[in-house]
Image (cartoon, coloured by chain):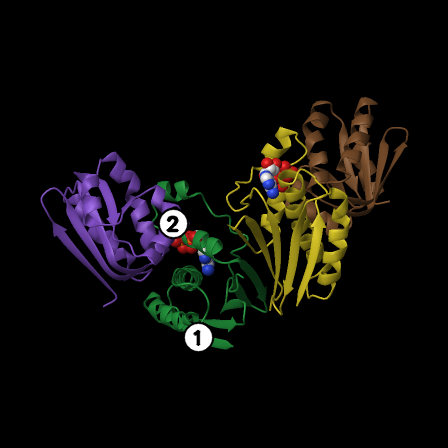
Chain colours: A purple, B brown, C green, D yellow
Amino acid sequence: MMLQIEKNIENEHSVLSLIGEIDASNSVELDEVILDMVQGGVRNLLVDCSQLEYISSAGLGVFMSYLEEFQEKEIKLVIFGLKEKVFQVFNILGLDQLIKIKSTKKDALEEVL
Amino acid sequence: MMLQIEKNIENEHSVLSLIGEIDASNSVELDEVILDMVQGGVRNLLVDCSQLEYISSAGLGVFMSYLEEFQEKEIKLVIFGLKEKVFQVFNILGLDQLIKIKSTKKDALEEVL
Amino acid sequence: MKHELKLYCDTTRLSELRNFLGDILEDTSLTEVDQHQVILAVEEVCANLIIHSHDCNPKECIDLTVKKSADLMIFEIRDFGQGFNILEYQEPDISFVMKSKRKGGLGIILVKRIMDKIEFETKANINICRLFKILKSK
Amino acid sequence: MKHELKLYCDTTRLSELRNFLGDILEDTSLTEVDQHQVILAVEEVCANLIIHSHDCNPKECIDLTVKKSADLMIFEIRDFGQGFNILEYQEPDISFVMKSKRKGGLGIILVKRIMDKIEFETKANINICRLFKILKSK
Ligand SMILES: Nc1ncnc2c1ncn2[C@@H]1O[C@H](COP(=O)(O)OP(=O)(O)O)[C@@H](O)[C@H]1O
Ligand SMILES: Nc1ncnc2c1ncn2[C@@H]1O[C@H](COP(=O)(O)OP(=O)(O)O)[C@@H](O)[C@H]1O
């Protein structure tokens, strides 16, 4: 299985773990999960990317498409645990300026509490 | 002599011939000649580049610096006879969109008459 | 050295493409981060062809040739049909992509920022997109 | 193959630089137009060093090394002193350059559009700017 997505609803926040590789063939799965969580009223969304090996523009585009809505609805999005090679892809596009990116879950939690 | 500049005041227009190479060491010469002509009240300035072998950013910058003034004072500038290699340098910067460039003196004259 | 791959126009084949490229890139002087980016750039061009030019028709295919020398890699991507000239495409600002909300529009920006040179040509109905990556840095 | 030139910081020496580069480029597969542009790009970087970093002091100098392989040319420009990182410099719009009327500001734009890759590093007080041009296209 190329991509596995785990959802964990904790007290004040939800953690989405992305495991594997996201490309044009499966980015819609990421989109559906996020849409679900938004509809479920998520307030703080942490995305654990410590096991994300790859993300292409299709996956990045999914995150981008929610940024304005998150801002309007005051939903906090924090991505954490990115591997260096994956982080550098966010970096090329300057997405690290648009999305909160933290090294560890602890740092990410501090952002939303 | 690396750069030779010839001025020809004809009836309705002046022709400036640039012969040789223009770089940071001599672009001021081009600047002085153009300034002179402006002060002399030139209305139509044709620049013959058929013997211009090279122009670096210093020379291009001289032309650029006059464009607004020429527009305000309704002075017409037309460059003609550019060798392909020199034209391509204007082209890289999109200067062919900002400055009238013609193949032949005849075409250039048609622009100003 | 020359490597070839026939890629069927089905996005589920993209992982195969990544494996193919990963094996070739492993033997180069590129860092892990650079290797990753080169794989991404080539995939983006191929994914675009699969999706936009070939409508994800798994019976159609595109051909990839990778040429490697001491200091340069050339990725040549060939397909038939309506060509799309990536050089003529004017990339949008990232802020525009964000506002458009169409979950796309970042691919070509990535390709242009990752690769050192891009060529495109169409001859006799074959479209060729060449991506160049410089290997040597010293 | 490797070629070296010591260039004194005097703009009247730039024509020497062009001759030096012209001789090397003549033997490559680059078209006349491309050769001309590569000469221009290297000159722009050197002219900037002469003017902005070395105040046209003809006693100071910069070192140029040109390396040529089958498919790549590398122009390495070294100097001492206060470094200027061309990669960090944000080029202005051409329309801004026109309005500014300062008869300059086009050099680095040209360099970035002509060359395929640019590197900059400073180590032990030596600044190194490397310009890469890909030779092969097929
Ligand atoms: N091979 C292609 N054939 C046709 N159109 C293409 C092709 N590649 C890209 N395009 C067009 O360029 C646009 C931008 O491409 P890209 O930056 O990769 O973003 P995305 O594919 O996610 O929309 C596409 O939306 C599409 O309209
Ligand atoms: N080697 C350098 N040392 C210091 N400053 C530099 C150097 N090269 C460029 N610069 C700065 O960058 C600016 C833009 O350079 P450029 O595009 O070549 O235009 P110009 O040199 O004509 O002003 C210069 O005006 C100068 O301020």
Crowd around label 1: few <14 · some 14–19 · many ≥20 (10 Å) = some
For badge 1, the amino acid type reads: Leu
Q: What's the mark number on residue A6?
A: none
Quarter of the image containing the N terminus of chain D? bottom right
Pick the residue in front: B86 or C1: C1
Q: Is residue A3 left or right of residue D57?
A: left
Pick the residue in front: A38 or A47: A47
Please provide percent x and percent y for residue B39: 80, 22
Q: Is residue A82 visible?
A: yes
From the viewer's perspective, is residue B74 above or below residue C29? above
Q: Is residue B20 left or right of residue D40?
A: right
Mark 2 residue CB less than 8 A from any atom of ligand 1: no
Quadrant of the rendered image containing residue B78 = top right
Q: Quadrant of ligand 1?
A: bottom left
- Tell me which chain the residue with mark 2 is part of: A
Tag 1 residue: C5
Q: Is residue C53 visible?
A: no
Q: CA distance from mark 2 to mark 1?
A: 30 Å
From the viewer's perspective, is residue C57 above or below residue D87? below
Tag 2 residue: A91
Please provide percent x and percent y for residue C99: 36, 40
Q: Secondary structure at mark 1?
A: strand
Please provide percent x and percent y for residue C27: 43, 73
Please provide percent x and percent y for residue A82: 28, 54
